[in-house]
Amino acid sequence: MTKPFIHDDFMLQNEVGKKLYHEYAKDMPVFDFHCHLSPKEISENHQFSNISEIWLHGDHYKWRAMRAVGVPEEIVTGLEATDEEKFAAWAKTVPYTIGNPLYHWTHLELKSYFGIEDLLNEDTSKQIWTEANKQLQGTELTTHSILKRSNVKGICTTDDPIDDLRYHKQIAENPAIDTKVLPTFRPDKAIEIQQPGFNDYITKLAAAAETKIATYDDVLTALEKRMNAFDEVGCVVSDHGIQTLPFAPATKEEAAKIFAKKLNQEELSHEEVEKYRTYTMTFLGKQYSQRQWVMQLHLGAIRNNNQRMFEKLGPDTGFDSMYDYDMAGSLNGFFNELDQTDDLPKTIIYNLNPIHNEVIATAIGNFQSSGVKGKIQFGSGWWFNDQKTGMVKQMTDLANHGLLSLFVGMLTDSRSFLSYTRHEYFRRILCNLIGEWVELGEVPEDYSLLGNMVQDICFHNANEFFGVGLQHQEA
């Protein structure tokens, strides 16, 4: 009988890696400390109508692949195409994705959540559509059930400061939800003063903070009020998804004048934009430090590159890519500014362009702190690096220049509840990598040493780093 594509030793090419995965990594709990899951869907224990809803709605990874093979946009994202038509188009696309992590993720998810071992293609599309949808009508694949069977102990969603956090409050009060679900404070729209919608956003921020915003001081006050509101529902982390980390030192007075110009709809120079961004980011960094929040920096995406499609579909629809720029000066400068007054919070840096791996891996060593293990982290392979080569490179570069054993590990960064197989995928790659080192004689075959290291990277390091006190026991 032919071995199924997804099997027990999938991605494990050495005996040490197999032992580390099956005996140490496989059953560790999941702490997904950065994702884009919907708190509303968690709160309401959402039941998905069909596999396209859970798989294709909002998944720009799949959209990009479908566009690449020529699927019409009206089927990729159009409102008139049926979900069955969208699924059929995806099924027809899947065989073309060999070599892309989408091929692995697709079949891992089918196997893990639906028990389906058939390869998805045009011939199996109808059968898999029918079987998956049948299972989705039961109680085993609601949002609560998926989180439980995926052994997810904690989640940090991604939330705008103007969010009223109603669903996080509902989740916290619901004893049926075993997973701790916390918000993440993501104030990008209050920082990116150069964006056309900035003034409108400031009006919304004022309403959310129940205050008036006429000056820059008012902006900072409103942000503080919203941070207080996030604190009240257990927030432990912020996030910034920015193209470049600004570092153009400025005084508060300068930032205030720049804000006043923007409010008056005057044009800003590049230098003024960077000064406003730098002062605001520095202010926020100090706030995070005082609150003992972790600061996440997602750096290096150049977004919405296709103007025609941006005007048609809006942001986050699959037209973003890697940016190339000088990172070292701004990264070290920004950290140094906060460190001067001992206001540098725990931080995780994620880069989209792998040319910056070693810049980050060496920079984090400049700002570690006594009494805190791994205070500044080089985050896991993000977005276009969220694949075998990218993950191996990120971990190898971190190991070469820092301490892999203190790494806080994997996250999904996903909008799909089926993406928890990405933690499994990461763990298989991690164990295989360490197994390769053992086979080369570069690392001792000491399973107590290596097993503990693997379990720390899978769960314990992140649990300690964020201070959320999640359960430690295995599934």
Image: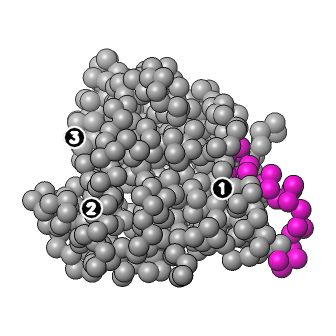
| Magenta stretch in the rendered image | 439-462
Q: Is residue 380 above or below residue 102?
A: above
User: Picture coordinates of residue 447 (x, y %)?
Assistant: 85, 60
Identify the residue at horizontal 53%, vertical 71% (top origin). Answer: 6
Distance, label 1 to label 2, CA atoms, is 30 Å
For the residue carrying disc 2, how many other residues have a C-alpha within 10 Å: few (<14), some (14-19), or many (20+)? Answer: few
Instruction: Examine the rendering and report whether any part of residue 475 can be seen.
Output: yes
Tell me the kind of residue under disc 2.
Thr
User: Picture coordinates of residue 191 (x, y %)?
Assistant: 40, 41
Please report whichever mark, 1 or 2, sits nearer to the chain's N-terminal start: 1
Verify CB contact (< 8 Å) between mark 1 and mark 2.
Answer: no
Q: Is residue 1 above or below residue 104?
A: below
Identify the residue at horizontal 35%, vertical 21% (top origin). Answer: 209
Tell me the kind of residue under disc 1.
Lys
Give the SS element for disc 1.
loop
Q: Is residue 343 above or below residue 6?
A: above
Please report whichever mark, 3 or 2, sits nearer to the chain's N-terminal start: 2
**Numbered disc in front, either 1 or 3:** 1
Location of the C terminus by quadrant is top right
Distance, label 1 to label 3, CA atoms, is 55 Å
Give the SS element for disc 2.
helix
Q: Is residue 284 left or right of residue 272?
A: right
Circle 2 is placed at which residue position?
130
Q: Compare residues 218 and 412 and report the one nearer the observer.
A: 412
Q: Quadrant of residue 3?
A: bottom right
Q: Is residue 448 magenta?
A: yes
Circle 1 is placed at which residue position?
26
Q: Quadrant of residue 78?
A: bottom left
Please report whichever mark, 1 or 3, sits nearer to the chain's N-terminal start: 1
Tell me the kind of residue under disc 3.
Gln
Distance, label 3 to label 2, CA atoms, is 54 Å
